[in-house]
Image: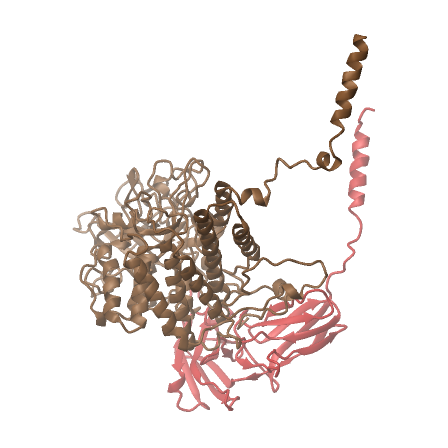
């Protein structure tokens, strides 16, 4: 048989038609969101540094969905409906997470059937209250008070408090244009702390910066932050 | 008649042929598979099995696993388009540096079982093979404990009984100290059966076992001592962290093992002191494979034109003297490392670029700023205007004009005109550094010299290089002895050991006992052992990794201050660019000005988190064996 053009055309048509089958797995569609909270106040952390784990029981293996909290303490996961257990791995976050008497980490049960918001209630070592950030005289000034939340035997001291300033809204120890530090021991009155730093210059001039203050707690890796504020000048 | 006879004979022959037993007929010995009992009856075949096990030894930095295993940690800049992640990532993944190769452990255990069961080997061969198998197994457990902490200690081959129940094959993690104890006791047990032969480099020797023991005991001692400063990095069962009370016991073991090599009882090892130029001499430690080299103890050997080669020289040779048009210059040592080499009067100082009043210093020769320093600097790093193979390398960033402007271009062949002259001239070094950050040329102003092969053709992809990788060498044994002695309070002994290593590098003013500090120990290991796969594990065991790589950007002031401090920040690799001063008529015309530059691809900062102290055991392993505990802080 001689191969003619229409043979090839029909063959290609058949091949492409075979690829038209629908995928048999639906994409995840249920959104779980939430925020780190302490008694109604959100807890700010460093971007991409504080992880969480979401376990779904009933399947072979025990591999969690992992993610990290955003700067303002929010998280979101797109997944399937089912029963999940939410936890934060040991040693992570500027807060205490309930330990079980058996030695494991406590988990929060989440039954997902539709989009859901689950705020994560934790006990931070400290909270930053009434953070006021303003620009004046070529400086960014921050005034805030520090509330010591955990005061029992597991309490920890403040190592440093810092003011970070950056040109974008990502403001963290690893990503900032200007920084002012104050040693924990040098804080005279925790209810009235003030930090200031000269406004940095940027290659492209802008009349605003983003800033926030954070507390580094002795012996804890992650810092706790006030919300990021856009300061215009 | 004749016909009948022939037919009869044929039928007899055929029936005789079928008289073979069925079982014999079907049982044909395979010709393509060598059975275990055949292999383990011939020493040459056993050696080939052992050769495979030697080939699978895990090294952190290794020449045949690519130049990137030497990069990272702020000590170098990766001048390669695909590798900027080293200087752009914000943190190391928790799983980085992990290893969990129980397939290798099983093969080692099988080898040990088979050699033990063999009846046809000579007793001398058998005991040596057995000791080598145990050496490799201990060596791999040492690699595992450095990265993972306590791991399940499997010293027997495990067999699955097909019952569907795997509980019998699930083992919990041992204590971290138990794994170190295992490495130490294995080394002690086999050292007597291994040969004491300094010319045997690629197979295990008594000195190799002792060097492994000294290093392992030192690691365990420092984890016990300095682990107390990071109580968060521990697990309640001791799978991670070692009690502080065990520190002095480990340091004593480390010192004794090192002393056994130093005393010569494992063969006559000594520092390599052959060439009159101390920098060339230092570089030659890694190049000299002859019996003159009594410094290297255990190496991964290579052989050119025989199939066992590596591309370290191809990847890292200077761009202007490269054997391959587009393969060069990837591993560029940072200014952070270069300036840490001390001056000959045992003091520390940054490379001077400005005088006291802030004016630039004009150097007549490109190598002048580096003069009067530790000879290991020029032995480890190629400084500008270094002579390599056939030519001087050409490192300069452009012309600096009197008004402060810089005239440069993205390639040495792209000429530009200088003010007051219509002639186009070369305005940037053939080796960079270019203002546009061209890869494969240096972007820090330096190239690496350690391991770079001066042999003709070593940079060609077709031939490659056969420089060997030294896993243990005598200078490290001396430094291990010095550190252990220091930690045990024997500072005058520590000074004695350290001064030998320093004298070889031209630092002839000896340190007194009182000069030996923790900072000195840290510094000396960095100067002697950089790019040898030590920096990560050293920083981890001293528990200062979180301070050195603290996730904060490194400013110029950070860079040039506190150079002698062990906990100095080292989060971003800086460069030092030479510029040719152009000001006709001025006495400084044609001289060199140096500037510290942070290469433009460096946008990340190194951030070592507490969870990085021990690499992650992945979820698949934990799912398969629920007895495995997770690492702390992960």
Q: Which shade is chain B?
A: brown
Is B476 rendered above or below residue B248? above
Left or right: where A83 falls relative to A67: right
- Can you tell which chain is drawn red? A
In the rendered image, residue B110, in percent from the top left (x then y), is placed at: 56, 53
Count of residue discs: 0
Is B519 rendered above or below residue A97? above
**Front residue of A129 and B34:** B34
- Colour scheme in the image? by chain
In the rendered image, residue B599, in percent from the top left (x then y), is placed at: 39, 56
Q: Quadrant of the N terminus of chain A?
A: top right
Residue B2 appears in the picture as rendered: yes
In the rendered image, residue B396, in percent from the top left (x then y), is placed at: 31, 48
**Front residue of B45 and B118:** B118
Left or right: where B54 falls relative to B12: left
Is B437 rendered above or below residue A130? above
**Front residue of B40 and B589:** B40
Residue B547 appears in the picture as rendered: no
Left or right: where B34 falls relative to A15: left
In the rendered image, residue B430, in percent from the top left (x then y), is placed at: 34, 43
Residue B335 figure quarter: bottom left
- Residue lying at the far right of the rendered structure: A1
Residue A8 figure quarter: top right
Q: Measuring 24% from the left and 66% from the top, which residue is drawn there?
A: B495
**Front residue of B379 and B446:** B379
């Amino acid at each position: 048989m001689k191969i003619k053009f229409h043979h090839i055309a029909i063959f290609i048509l058949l091949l492409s038609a075979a690829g038209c089958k629908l995928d048999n797995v639906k994409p995840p569609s249920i959104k779980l969101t939430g925020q780190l909270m302490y008694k109604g106040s959100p807890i700010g952390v460093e971007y991409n540094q504080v992880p969480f784990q979401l376990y779904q029981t009933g399947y072979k293996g025990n591999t969690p969905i992992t993610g990290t909290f955003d700067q303002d303490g929010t998280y979101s996961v797109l997944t399937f409906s089912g029963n999940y257990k939410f936890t934060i791995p040991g040693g992570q976050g500027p807060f205490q997470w309930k330990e079980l008497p058996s030695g494991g980490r406590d988990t929060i049960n989440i039954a997902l059937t539709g989009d859901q918001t689950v705020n994560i209630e934790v006990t931070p070592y400290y909270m930053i209250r009434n953070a006021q950030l303003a620009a004046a005289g070529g400086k960014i000034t921050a005034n805030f008070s520090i509330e010591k939340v955990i005061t029992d035997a597991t309490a920890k001291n403040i190592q440093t408090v810092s003011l970070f300033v950056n040109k974008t809204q990502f403001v963290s120890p690893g990503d900032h244009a200007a920084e002012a530090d104050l040693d924990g021991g040098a804080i005279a009155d925790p209810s009235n702390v003030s930090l200031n730093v000269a406004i940095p210059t940027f290659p492209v001039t802008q009349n605003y910066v983003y800033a926030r203050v954070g507390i580094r707690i002795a012996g804890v890796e992650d810092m706790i932050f006030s919300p990021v504020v856009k300061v215009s000048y | 008649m004749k016909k009948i006879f022939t037919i009869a004979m044929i039928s007899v022959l055929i029936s005789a042929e079928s008289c073979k037993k069925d079982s014999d007929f079907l049982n044909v010995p395979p010709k393509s598979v060598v059975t275990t009992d055949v292999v383990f009856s011939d020493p040459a075949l056993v050696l080939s099995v052992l050769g495979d096990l030697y080939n699978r030894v895990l090294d952190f930095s290794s020449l045949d696993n690519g130049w990137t295993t030497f990069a990272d940690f702020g000590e170098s800049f990766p001048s390669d388009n695909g590798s900027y992640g080293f200087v752009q990532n914000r943190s190391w993944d928790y799983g980085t540096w992990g290893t969990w190769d129980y397939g290798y452990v099983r093969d080692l255990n099988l080898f040990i079982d088979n050699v033990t069961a063999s009846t046809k080997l000579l007793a001398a061969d058998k005991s040596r093979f057995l000791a080598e198998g145990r050496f490799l197994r201990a060596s791999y457990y040492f690699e595992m404990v450095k990265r993972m902490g306590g791991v399940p200690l499997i010293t027997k081959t495990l067999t699955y009984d097909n019952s569907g129940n795997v509980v019998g094959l699930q083992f919990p993690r041992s204590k971290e100290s138990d794994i170190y104890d295992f490495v130490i006791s294995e080394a002690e047990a086999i050292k007597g059966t291994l040969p004491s032969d300094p010319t045997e480099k690629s197979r295990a020797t008594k000195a190799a076992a002792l060097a492994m023991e000294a290093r392992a005991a030192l690691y365990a001692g420092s984890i016990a001592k300095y682990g107390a400063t990071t109580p968060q990095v521990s697990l309640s069962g001791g799978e991670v962290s070692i009690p502080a009370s065990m520190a002095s016991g480990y340091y004593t073991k480390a010192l004794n093992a090192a002393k056994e090599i130093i005393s010569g009882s494992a063969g006559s090892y000594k520092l390599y002191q052959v060439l009159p130029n101390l920098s060339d001499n230092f570089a030659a430690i890694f190049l000299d494979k002859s019996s003159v080299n009594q410094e290297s103890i255990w190496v991964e050997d290579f052989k050119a034109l025989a199939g066992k080669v590596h591309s370290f020289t191809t990847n890292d040779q200077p761009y202007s003297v490269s054997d391959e048009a587009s393969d060069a210059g990837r591993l560029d040592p940072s200014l952070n490392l270069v300036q840490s080499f001390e001056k000959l009067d045992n003091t520390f100082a940054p490379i001077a670029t400005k005088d006291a009043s802030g004016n630039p210093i004009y150097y007549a020769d490109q190598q002048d700023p580096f003069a009067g320093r530790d000879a290991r600097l020029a032995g480890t790093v190629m400084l500008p205007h270094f002579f390599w193979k056939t030519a001087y390398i050409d490192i300069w960033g452009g012309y600096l004009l009197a008004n402060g402007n810089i005239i440069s271009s993205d390639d040495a062949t792209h000429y530009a005109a200088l003010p007051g002259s219509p002639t186009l001239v070369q305005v940037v070094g053939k080796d960079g550094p270019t203002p546009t950050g061209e890869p494969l040329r240096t972007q820090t102003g330096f190239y690496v010299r350690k391991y770079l092969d001066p042999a003709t053709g070593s940079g060609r992809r077709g031939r490659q290089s056969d420089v060997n990788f030294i896993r243990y060498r005598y200078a490290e044994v001396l430094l291990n002895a010095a550190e252990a002695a220091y930690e045990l309070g024997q500072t005058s002994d520590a000074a004695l050991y350290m001064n030998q290593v320093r004298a070889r590098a031209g630092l002839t003013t000896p340190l007194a006992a009182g000069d030996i500090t923790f900072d000195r120990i840290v510094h000396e290991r960095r100067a002697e052992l950089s790019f040898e796969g030590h920096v990560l594990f050293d920083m981890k065991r001293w528990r200062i990794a979180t301070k050195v790589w603290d996730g904060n950007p490194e400013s110029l002031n950070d860079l040039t201050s506190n150079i002698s401090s062990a906990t100095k920040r080292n989060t971003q690799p800086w460069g030092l660019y030479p510029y040719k001063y152009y000001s006709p008529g001025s006495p400084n015309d044609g001289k060199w000005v140096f500037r510290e530059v942070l290469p433009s691809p460096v946008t990340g900062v190194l951030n070592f988190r507490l969870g990085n102290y021990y690499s992650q055991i992945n979820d698949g392993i934990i799912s398969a064996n629920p007895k495995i505990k997770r690492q702390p802080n992960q």
